[in-house]
Image: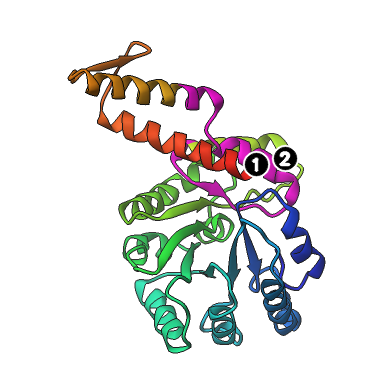
Amino acid sequence: MPGSNRRALEKGRSLPADGLILDLEDAVAPAAKEEARRQVLEALAEGGYGHRELIVRINGLDSSWGRDDLTAAATSGADAILLPKVESADMVRSAEEALHAVGAPETLRLWCMIETPLGVLNSREIAASPRLEALVMGTSDLAKDLHAAHTPDRLPLVTSLGLCLLAARAHGLAIIDGVHLDLDDDEGFAESCRQGAEMGFDGKSLIHPKTIAEANRAFAPSPDDVARSHRIADAHAEAMAAGKGVVVVDGRLVEALHVAEAARLIALAEAIAARQS
């Protein structure tokens, strides 16, 4: 949500999204940076966003606005601050030190955008920060720096996406897939969401409200997946109660890893249902 767009900030209160990135960086023209910061702070103070996680994307700390953005967001009531173009663990540590210096609450998380080749290569170290909660793929800038084509299958980006997924999972972080820029390409957007979900991403960055429904559908467990997860959980519980070590569900051997994944999908489905109600 562009921080300079008051109407967008208001509309965010009614969108069926899990999180809102209130943007002070790329979506805001240089002349509007100060006004955008003021409007975002006012929106956060007013509240009314319900369950939606609120993330403020600041300008780079080496920019004319970054330090002031960080200081303002630190005690704004936001859930997290999104750092753009993170390329090293030192950049994260610098933000952590600045947050500590201005009295940011320990509950305030950091998210990091990985959108350059150096950021991808250093994602393992970047992801190790104790204040970090999520990585966000900046696939548009990354494709530009790689001189890569925007293809429907995104094969030119698969290596970068995979490395960042490994870094996020190794450190127990969430990871959000990059944007799909063509708003008229409904089929391509749906395929991009399907691919991201299959790869293991937790969700997708969106740039228009009309794409929320498809993203929610793609990244939520399907009814079949949930039903099968319940069968696995029930069969495993029965087997344990009977002292059996082997469980077969739908003709397939079930091991501990399948039980853990079933529990994760059930919990995710229950969380989604709770929000929808």
Mark 1 and mark 2 in contact (Cβ < 8 Å)? no
- Nearer to me, 211 or 273: 273
Whether 208 is drawn above or below 5: the answer is: above
Give the secondary structure at mark 1. helix
What's the amino acid at mark 2?
Asp
Which residue is found at the position 68% from the left and 61% from the top? 49
Q: Residues within 10 Å of mark 2 (few under 14, many from 20)?
A: few
What's the amino acid at mark 1?
Gln
Whether 158 is drawn above or below 187: the answer is: below
Whether 86 is drawn above or below 210: the answer is: below
Q: Picture coordinates of residue 135 (x, y %)?
A: 46, 59
Give the secondary structure at mark 2. loop
* Residue 260 appears in the rendering: yes
Q: Picture quarter containing residue 258?
A: top left
Q: Picture coordinates of residue 262 (x, y %)?
A: 39, 31
Residue annotated with mark 2: 185
Q: Picture quarter containing residue 212?
A: top right
Per the rendering, the mark at residue 276 is 1
Which residue is found at the position 74% from the left and 46% from the top? 183
Specify start and end residues of the magenta stretch as a single range. Answer: 198-227
